[in-house]
Image: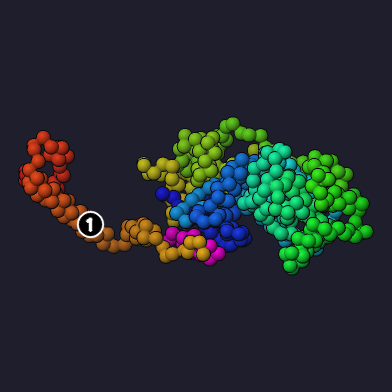
Amino acid sequence: MTTIEMQYEFLRIIGYGGFSQVQLACHRLTGTQVAIKITPRRGPASRVVAREIDIMKKLHHPNIIKLYQISRSLRYAYIIMQFAEGGDLHDHICQTGTLEEGEASTIFGQILCGVRYLHRSGIVHGDLKPENILIDVNGTIKISDFGLSSYFTEGVDIRTNRGTDYYLSPERLLGQAYDGPKADIWCLGVILYEMIMGYKPFYSHRKEKLFKKIKTEKIWTPPDISNDVKELINLLLRKNPLERPSLESIMEHPWVARGQGCTAVPPPVSTGLNPKVVRQMQEMGFRPRKLCLSVRKQKYDKLMCLYLLLQEQEDLAGPAQPAGPESPATPAASTSAVPEPGRIGDPPADAPLTTGSPPPPVEAALPALSSVSAGGPEPESHKVSRDASQEGHQPGTSHRCQGQATRVQRMRRRVADSLRRLASCVRLPKTHKWFKNRVVPVKGEHETQP
């Protein structure tokens, strides 16, 4: 069985959540960096993780973070996602202080595209904030962290009031049912204000005072910003949710239309597999039939993850670039290696995930989750497999194998003798099934009939 440590090399911790930890890792076969969200399988986070996984499987949009794989161990659930090299919007605001209106308009337009896709899919994000707005290496916005997201029906209010204090809308603070999409629009107004001003519209160290400001205090905007963005902020941060505009009207606003961010469209749903990627995986030792079943049923297992990563490398390489040894579309593992019979479906024997010493277990790198499940020493299964793999390179292996075979023969003799004594005491009839399925004696010995 392939473990998460065999598929990925864990590099460092890049973030924390309420019950989770996010680590940067490298996919061993392709060399692609991914983000792995690690959450306990038991406890208060179990339902949240199940809903988050179910939501992420349904989302396919350029401004939504990609899901690659879902893996589970006895203690943890692993959500393998796309890694955004550019960091998050909060860090970008902290580095620049304030954003120019042109850049802010482009970023805000991409955020609107992703949120509109979510609402059209019947999903409320519930925790929109700059920390959950990621930026990839090309400057594309990626909305992430769907731990507090939920499904909604048009015209039906929702009741969950979980979220970040600074981005809660006034109606959510009342503890009553509210319109989910309108609450997301309030969060968009807070994000826009923070991008233009460099700080939050409502701030206080005391939670009671902060909530009072959110419910009663008016928004202050400086005179040096344009009237268009000032008007848009005031529209988004209306205390009454019925007075807030819809997403369609926000995207038609002159200030948003001035930027070039809202151009992303959902990719068409693919009905077939890329034959080049399938051929590449077949050369690596994977069965095309199992791959086709995994992708079409959206299993998000290791086969589908490898296919998605190779497909992404193929898209980045372009159709004109040949696939050579140094091409990004070629995985790090050797494609000429074919696994031994009976091992098809697992990575080849000389792939990077099996060379060298085995990586340390992930549990050892989870200090933040120790209250739920503490990491222990290396499992016995890892030690046995490591010792077994090293015995072939040490002298005297043949003597150990002979000794092991001798012990097996002794055990078989003891089992056979015990069964014979038991049969003689019970005096089973000759037609009993034991005589048909009796233990075969070791070669070279004489069988003694009971």
The kind of secondary structure element at disc 1 is helix
Towards the viewer: 362 or 186? 186
Residue 368 drawn in magenta: yes
- Residue 339 position in % (x across, y down): 41, 44
Quadrant (top left, top right, bottom left, bottom right) of the C terminus: top left
Name the image quarter holding residue 218. Answer: bottom right
Q: Residue drawn at (77%, 54%), measured in percent from left and top?
A: 170
Name the residue carrying label 1. 404
Above or below residue 82? Residue 19 is: below
Whether residue 233 sits left or right of residue 112 in the image: it is right
What's drawn in magenta, residue-wise?
357-370
Q: Residue drawn at (50%, 54%), measured in percent from left and top?
A: 41
Crowding at label 1, few (<14), some or many (≥20) Cα neighbours within 10 Å?
few
- Residue 314 position in % (x across, y down): 61, 42
Whether residue 159 sits left or right of residue 13 in the image: it is right
Asked whether residue 192 is in view, the answer is yes
- Residue 255 position in % (x across, y down): 87, 47
Q: Furthest residue to the top?
A: 271
Colour mapping? rainbow
Q: Residue drawn at (22%, 57%), measured in percent from left and top?
A: 404
Towards the viewer: 50 or 28? 50
Residue 367 drawn in magenta: yes
Q: Residue drawn at (37%, 57%), measured in percent from left and top?
A: 381
Q: Amino acid at mark 1?
A: Gln
Total numbered labels placed on residues in the image: 1
Asked whether residue 31 is in view, the answer is no
Q: Furthest residue to the bottom?
A: 205
- Residue 331 position in % (x across, y down): 54, 47
Towards the viewer: 351 or 449? 449
Whether residue 177 sits left or right of residue 223 in the image: it is left
